[in-house]
Image (cartoon, rainbow, N blue to C red):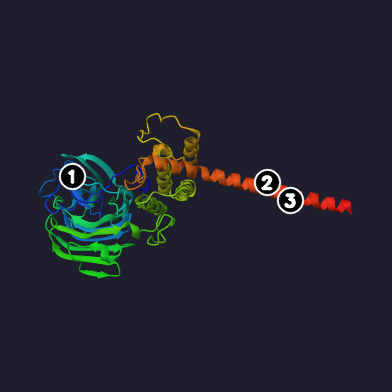
């Protein structure tokens, strides 16, 4: 993976992998979605000649869907007249608000390429694209592979359930010549029971949490397959579980810590002081010792968000504003939490605001300050216990010496 895409989270807080340039009847546009990326032909001037088109011959995409994140791999086979072209996919649009893109890898005929982030493309000035050049041979098909890891930044939820959307969509905005000859989409569910999944278009095959759609001679303007999920919050692992069982062994650190923080923020009960202390300790450990730079950045950003919870103020203040004066307990809490405010734009911003179903902010401030004082109270208790042990040992020695003197 290139240096550009290793440091991607700071560049793309609201990422979209959906081929949508304009809304149309039947388009799927949830506020939080995980969508398999598909390369689409594009022109920097948004005015490609009619005879300068590329045909999407075959498309295979796999989407591994977790309650708080998704990993995708797609492979597209393209043909067209000999010459240079540009391909890409939208990073964000005016119509979708999606999760933070944590990893992105693009390969063209097995060769890794660095995608370029393109802002204000053509007349759709609010769109942002990832784009890269390709060279068509005119005869042999060109294979383009895209792999991503995408994290939910603001999961769509109510007080009882988390709403997820996992889709492959090839929109009519993509200027492909002819129809899509062969499409195969595989959706794998992790930690999501099948009975909670709704599929507007029934899958061709399903087995043990894996759903597959196979479409031959599909029209590129009418392909949208996938699933909607309504996951009860109570079914998520509790706050005491740092690493959820549905995460694979090779899951990167940033996905693990993101899932833990997301589950912490999604629970519809205010945390206890011990849970807050465990969260801060875990974030400090990742920020200080993880070999994953994305995990370090996200953990530090989450700590900076938590620092605002130390305060007893009902109205939050902006990061670039001077904070109001603090008392000793709040100062101790801020020092205990730490974090880097400069990194707030890097992370998915899961802890920026407590869920509406939690206790009010003032109560959370009390909990945070109490959690911050727990390490100090334990140290004092240990010191008191050690002192008591020394005194007891001294008394025992003194008593024994008195007995020997009497003899």
Callout 3 secondary element: helix
Indicate the secondary structure of the residue bearing disc 1: loop
Could you say which is closer to the camera, residue 205 or residue 235? 235
In the picture of the structure, the residue carrying the numbered disc 3 is 393
Task: Quickly name the residue at label 2.
Answer: 387
Q: CA distance from mark 1 to mark 3?
A: 83 Å
For the residues labelled 1 and 2, the Cα–Cα distance comes to 75 Å
Label 1 crowd bin: few (<14), some (14–19), many (20+), radius 10 Å: some
Q: Where is residue 39 shown, x and y percent of the image?
A: 23, 53
Mark 2 to mark 3 CA distance (whole Å)? 10 Å
Residue 127 visible to the viewer: yes
Circle 3 Cα neighbour tier, 10 Å, few/some/many (<14 / 14–19 / ≥20):
few
- Which residue matches tag 1? 43
**Residue 306, can we see it?**
no
| Dot placed on the residue nearer the N-terminal end, 1 or 2 | 1
Q: Residue furthest front?
A: 406
């Amino acid at each position: 993976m290139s240096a550009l895409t290793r440091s991607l989270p700071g560049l793309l807080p609201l990422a979209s992998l959906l081929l949508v340039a304009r809304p149309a009847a039947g388009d799927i546009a949830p506020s939080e979605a995980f969508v398999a990326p598909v390369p689409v032909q594009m022109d920097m001037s948004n005015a490609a000649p009619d005879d300068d088109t590329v045909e999407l011959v075959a498309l295979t995409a796999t989407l591994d869907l977790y309650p708080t994140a998704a990993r995708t791999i797609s492979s597209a086979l393209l043909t067209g007249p000999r010459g240079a072209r540009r391909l890409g996919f939208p990073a964000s649009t005016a119509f979708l608000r999606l999760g933070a893109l944590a990893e992105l890898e693009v390969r063209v005929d097995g060769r890794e390429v660095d995608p370029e982030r393109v802002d204000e493309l053509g007349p759709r000035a609010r769109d942002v694209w990832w784009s890269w050049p390709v060279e068509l041979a005119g005869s042999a098909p060109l294979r383009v592979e895209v792999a991503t890891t995408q994290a939910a930044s603001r999961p769509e939820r109510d007080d009882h359930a988390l709403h997820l959307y996992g889709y492959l969509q090839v929109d009519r905005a993509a200027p492909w010549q002819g129809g899509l000859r062969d499409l195969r989409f595989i959706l794998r569910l992790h930690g999501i029971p099948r009975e909670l999944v709704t599929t507007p278009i029934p899958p061709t095959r399903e087995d043990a949490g894996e759903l597959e759609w196979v479409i031959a001679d599909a029209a590129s303007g009418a392909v949208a397959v996938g699933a909607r999920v309504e996951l009860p919050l109570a079914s998520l692992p509790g706050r005491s579980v740092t690493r959820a069982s549905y995460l694979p062994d090779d899951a990167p650190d940033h996905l693990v810590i993101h899932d833990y923080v997301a589950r912490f923020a999604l629970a519809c009960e205010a945390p206890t002081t011990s849970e807050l202390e465990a969260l801060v300790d875990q974030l400090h450990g990742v920020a200080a010792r993880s070999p994953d730079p994305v995990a370090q950045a996200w953990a530090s950003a989450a700590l900076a968000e938590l620092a605002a919870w130390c305060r007893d103020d009902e109205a939050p203040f902006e990061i670039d504003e001077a904070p109001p004066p603090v008392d000793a307990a709040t100062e101790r809490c801020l020092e205990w939490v730490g974090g880097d405010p400069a990194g707030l734009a890097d992370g998915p911003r899961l802890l920026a605001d407590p869920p509406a179903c939690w206790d009010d902010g003032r109560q959370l401030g009390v909990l945070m300050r109490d959690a911050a004082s727990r390490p100090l109270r334990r140290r004092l208790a240990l010191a008191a216990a050690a002192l008591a042990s020394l005194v007891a040992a001294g008394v025992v020695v003194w008593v024994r010496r008195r007995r020997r003197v009497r003899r």
